[in-house]
Amino acid sequence: MRGILGWFLQVGVVTVLNIRTMAQRVTPSLVAIVGVTGVVAVFVAVLSMAEGFRATMATTGSADTVMVMRAGANTEMSSILQREDARVVGDAPGIRRTGDGPVVSAELFVIVDLPKRSTNSTANVSLRGVQPQAYLVRDNFRMIEGRRFEFGRNEIIAGRGAASQFAGLEVGRVLEWGGNRWTVVGIFDAGGTVADSELWCDAGVLGPLYRRGPSFQVVRARLESPEAFDRLRAALASDPRLNLQVQRESDYYAEQSQLIVTLIMTLGTVVGGLMGIGAVFGAVNTMYSAVAARTREIATLRALGFRAGPVVVSVLAEALLLALVGGVIGGAIAFLLFNGFRTSTVNWQTFSQVAFAFRVTPRLIVTGIVYALVMGLAGGLFPAIRAARLPVVTALREL
């Protein structure tokens, strides 16, 4: 027991002495901290992009909202429904109804070009044709500027995310696509969901103008309750007139987010790994400098009976402390600069832009700090071993 307590006592003494002498090595210490800070800031910022995109997709839809598409279609773009299909879905059991009829919106969308505000390039934006019940199908829909479009007219309303990312969507502006003129009459907020990245208009106007005839691509519907999902799916599957599939809207968008989230996470890991290697080399150089500066001190401690283990721990403790400081600063910088920053990226399932906000969550900051500690441990390991192996006699000659 005395041996163990003595070992920990030596660890405490050597570590405290090591930390107290850090002021004499300010420049190399700052180099190590700055290196770790940069790595963590970039690493957390890239991962926050994936987190923001995932959050946008995950918050779209609810358990009692369903999407009905052609069987075998994995996106709206590859689905084709006829008007009769939409009518049958509206009459199916489990669909919520109001005084105006079933809460069902048969919809289609086309891709239009709009210039990005941040660059001179153009981007694909979804122009979605909806029916009157579309406002009840979505949760948290509200107009924040202007008014809703009038059915039967070439009018559009723009989502808040689209209006912030793309030029020409101010209320009163007239846009032209495919020889048709559209007037922007309002801006809406859909609670940070995918709909915030879309433009809406009357499906009855959009279809003929783009030669879609009486067809649609998806039917969105509200259920009487989340438990009504199986009843609706069974009813549509047993109808010989139909060849449809039913999916919860939340599940549909969660699946769509997987590709882009995986891509961003992979990119972030690769970039963070490459930058981390550079930071580790910086930490190694810093700790080797610290060991060289403390050669006499280490030799004296060893001559007084201090073991090699406490010396190793003291060097690692300094490296971990520098890494911790860099990790905390890097996480704070990522939060201050990127949390809430709005941008847009391509949804590779529909080839249209989705606007979203970066999300620097506490979990990401903790991940960044843990990564910083790993870099500090890797950077301090070999210098710590070298310090422990310093020949006492050789080191004492420098006194």
Image (tube, helix red, strand yellow):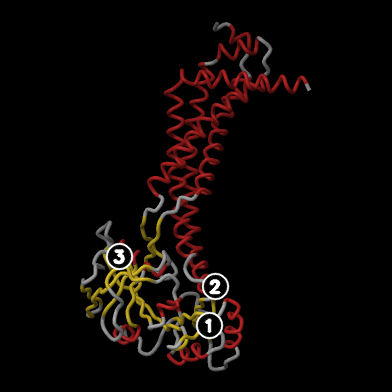
Q: Residue drawn 54% across and 89% down? A: 92
Look at the image and tell me in which quarter the N terminus lies: top right
Among numbered discs 3 and 1, the one appearing first in the sequence: 1
Please, which residue is most extreme toward the front here?
Answer: 99
Q: Position of residue 204 (x, y in %)?
A: 33, 86
Residue 286 as seen in the image, left or right of residue 132: right
Cα distance in 3D space between marks 3 and 1: 34 Å
Q: Nearer the viewer, residue 83 or 122?
A: 83
- Disc 3 crowd rating (10 Å Cα; few below 14, some 14-19, many 20+) is many
The secondary element bearing badge 1 is classed as loop
Which mark's residue is nearer the viewer, 3 or 1?
A: 3
State how far apart marks 2 and 1 are (Cα).
21 Å
Label 2 Cα crowd, 10 Å radius (few <14 / some 14-19 / many 20+)? some
Q: Is residue 278 above or below residue 105?
A: above
For image coordinates 47% across by 60% down, the residue present is: 55
Residue occupying the point 49% across, 21% down: 22
Q: Secondary structure at mark 2?
A: loop
* Residue 63, label in figure: 2
Amino acid type for the residue under numbered disc 3: Ala
Distance between the Cα atoms at labels 2 and 3? 28 Å
Q: Which residue is mark 3?
A: 163
